[in-house]
Image (tube, rainbow, N blue to C red):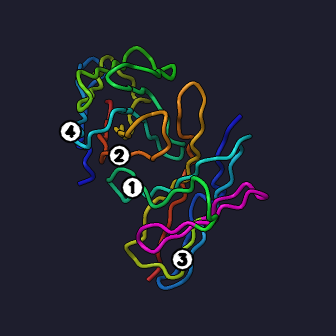
């Protein structure tokens, strides 16, 4: 069965430090991969997506993610976090069943230390 | 503002009440979705509408009743809810549910059932 795992429920990072959020998926075919961010009281905003081609994908707000097929991973990174990055981050895999649908991870809450 | 508008932002209702959630998009998207977001759980897809036709109903209890009068509007009618139905209800839209372009989300309705 398809699934998405985000192993870290919470991550705390100092402002200015680098960030990596982990995402692992289980899917038999080539996946479509997404990262979304949700600020408090808001809906989800698409940060970046991978469909094919270059496995290093650039997104908005200075984020990037790398697709590693051998590790079934799509980790999100940012070289230097800002206090405004505090939010919850969701990884999702697009799969085609009877319809196309997104399989979601449970999210990782990012806390920024001043 | 993401282009998907949800009203109301907050709703408190008793278990015997009837209320409706509204979602509106003017992005020219053809597919609309209702998701339930509960704490510490992955997003749960409830309903999918493609060109106003319901194409997915993920075993949602009948106390939730969707309505899609046109491609721009989506409603979720609520009646005789239970306290465990308290959650953030998110509406999303996409160009086409068979394509992998990612979704645009509204800011959600925070529902509390008392």
Quadrant containing the N terminus of chain A is top right
- SS of the residue under disc 1: strand
**Front tag of 3 and 1:** 1
The crowd level at tag 3 (other Cα within 10 Å; few <14, some 14-19, many 20+) is: some
The residue wearing badge 2 is B105
**Front tag of 4 and 1:** 1
Q: CA distance from mark 4 to mark 2?
A: 15 Å
The residue wearing badge 3 is A13
- Judging from the image, mark 2 belongs to the subunit labelled B
- Judging from the image, mark 1 belongs to the subunit labelled A
Q: CA distance from mark 2 to mark 3?
A: 27 Å
- Judging from the image, mark 4 belongs to the subunit labelled B
Q: Earlier in the sequence, mark 3 or mark 1?
A: 3
Nearer to us in this view, B85 or A89: A89
> Is disc 1 on the same chain as disc 4?
no
Is residue A70 a member of the stretch shown in magenta? yes
> Is disc 1 on the same chain as disc 2?
no
Residue found 61% across the figure and 55% down from its top: A52
Q: Earlier in the sequence, mark 4 or mark 2?
A: 4
Badge 2 vs badge 1, beta-carbon distance below 8 Å: yes
Q: CA distance from mark 4 to mark 1?
A: 20 Å
């Amino acid at each position: 069965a398809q699934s998405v795992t985000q192993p870290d429920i919470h991550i705390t990072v100092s402002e200015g430090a680098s960030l990596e959020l982990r995402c692992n998926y289980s899917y038999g075919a080539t996946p479509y991969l997404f990262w979304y961010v949700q600020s408090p009281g808001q809906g989800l905003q698409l940060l970046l997506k991978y469909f094919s081609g270059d496995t290093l994908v650039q997104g908005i707000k200075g984020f990037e993610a790398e697709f590693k097929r051998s590790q079934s991973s799509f980790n999100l990174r940012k070289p230097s976090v800002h206090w405004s990055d505090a939010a919850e981050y969701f990884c999702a895999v697009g799969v085609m069943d009877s319809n196309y649908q997104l399989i979601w991870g449970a999210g990782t809450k990012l806390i920024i230390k001043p | 503002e993401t282009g998907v508008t949800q009203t109301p932002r907050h709703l408190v209702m008793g278990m015997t009440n009837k209320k409706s959630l509204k979602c509106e998009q003017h992005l020219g998207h053809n597919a609309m979705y209702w998701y339930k977001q509960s704490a510490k759980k992955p997003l749960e897809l409830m309903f999918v509408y493609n060109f106003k036709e319901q194409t997915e109903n993920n075993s949602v209890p009948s106390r939730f009743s969707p309505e899609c009068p046109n491609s721009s509007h989506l409603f979720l009618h609520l009646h005789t809810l239970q306290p465990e139905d308290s959650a953030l209800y998110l509406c999303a839209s996409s160009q086409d549910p068979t394509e992998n372009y990612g979704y645009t989300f509204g800011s959600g309705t925070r529902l509390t059932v008392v």
